[in-house]
Amino acid sequence: MKRQIKIAPSLLSANFANLADDVKKCEKGGADILHCDIMDGHFVPNITIGPLIVRAIKPITKLPLNCHLMIEEPEKYIDEFVNAGADYISIHVECQKHLHRTLSLIKSYNIKAGIALNPLTPLDYAFDAAEYCDFILLMSVNPGFGGQKFIKSTLKKCETLTNFLNKNKLEHIDIEVDGGIKIDNVADIVSAGANMLVSGSGVFEGDVISNIKQLRANAETAVK
């Protein structure tokens, strides 16, 4: 089964002085999802946005909002992000003692639940949790800051995860990759099995609409 390509601009790289304008450009470019990087200054060395910004974005777009929670004790804030308008929520396996419980909580709100893995986190976590997920996020940079270079070992990790999902009849699960995705490397990432593609500087540096369209065009060339 072919996974549908989904382009997800990361609002971390958007112009927050004109956020509504950048959101509209993402829509015009044909983006599928808006990716919201939520950082608390504890799990990662940066502080970004929270439920208030998600709530402000929700009424100005028809695109689903994917809230990537890079925070400690995310289970305490699931209801806040759901109420703010999250359509997808991913939680990091590195900060979860009760992963199944938190995934079940997210799914109880009838939204998409996913797990996120840092670059050197073993894939065993994804193998064990996959059946409870709608998507699995592989970080291809160390989380905390935008504009980082893609870690090439993510390609092998993505291939391994793809093979596992296919073998276990879990092809419906989206494979998301986040970090360093650009027009010139997106085809390689899709060839490795990813279909949900998060790009920040690759979208917002330059012509947003053109960048999204080119990302999709390059990604589509590698769909198997």
Image (cartoon, rainbow, N blue to C red):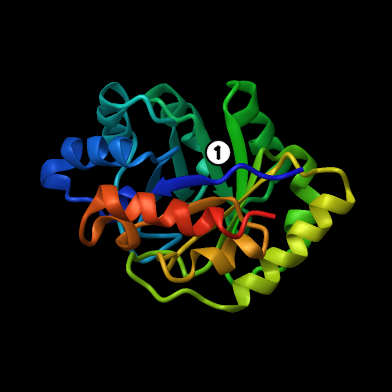
Q: Is 172 on the left or on the right of 61, as rendered? A: right
**Can residue 39 be seen from the camera position used here?**
no
Q: Is 45 on the left or on the right of 72, as rendered? A: left
Q: In the image shown, does 61 or 221 lie closer to the viewer?
A: 221
Q: Is residue 24 above or below residue 219?
A: above
Q: How many marks?
A: 1
Q: Residue at x 21, y 42 (%)?
A: 22
Q: Position of residue 135 (x, y in %)?
A: 64, 44
Q: In the image shown, does 51 or 164 lie closer to the viewer?
A: 164
Q: Position of residue 174 (x, y in %)?
A: 64, 45
Q: Residue at x 17, y 50 (%)?
A: 15
Which residue does the numbered mark 1 point to in the structure image?
75
Q: Is residue 77 above or below residue 143?
A: above
Q: Is residue 50 above or below residue 104?
A: below
Q: Residue at x 45, y 60 (%)?
A: 43
Q: Residues within 10 Å of mark 1 (few under 14, many from 20)?
A: some
Q: In the image shown, does 208 or 121 lie closer to the viewer?
A: 208
Q: Is residue 165 above or below residue 143?
A: above
Q: Position of residue 99 (x, y in %)?
A: 69, 45
Give the amino acid at mark 1. Answer: Glu
Secondary-structure class at tag 1: helix
Q: Is 104 on the left or on the right of 19, as rendered? A: right
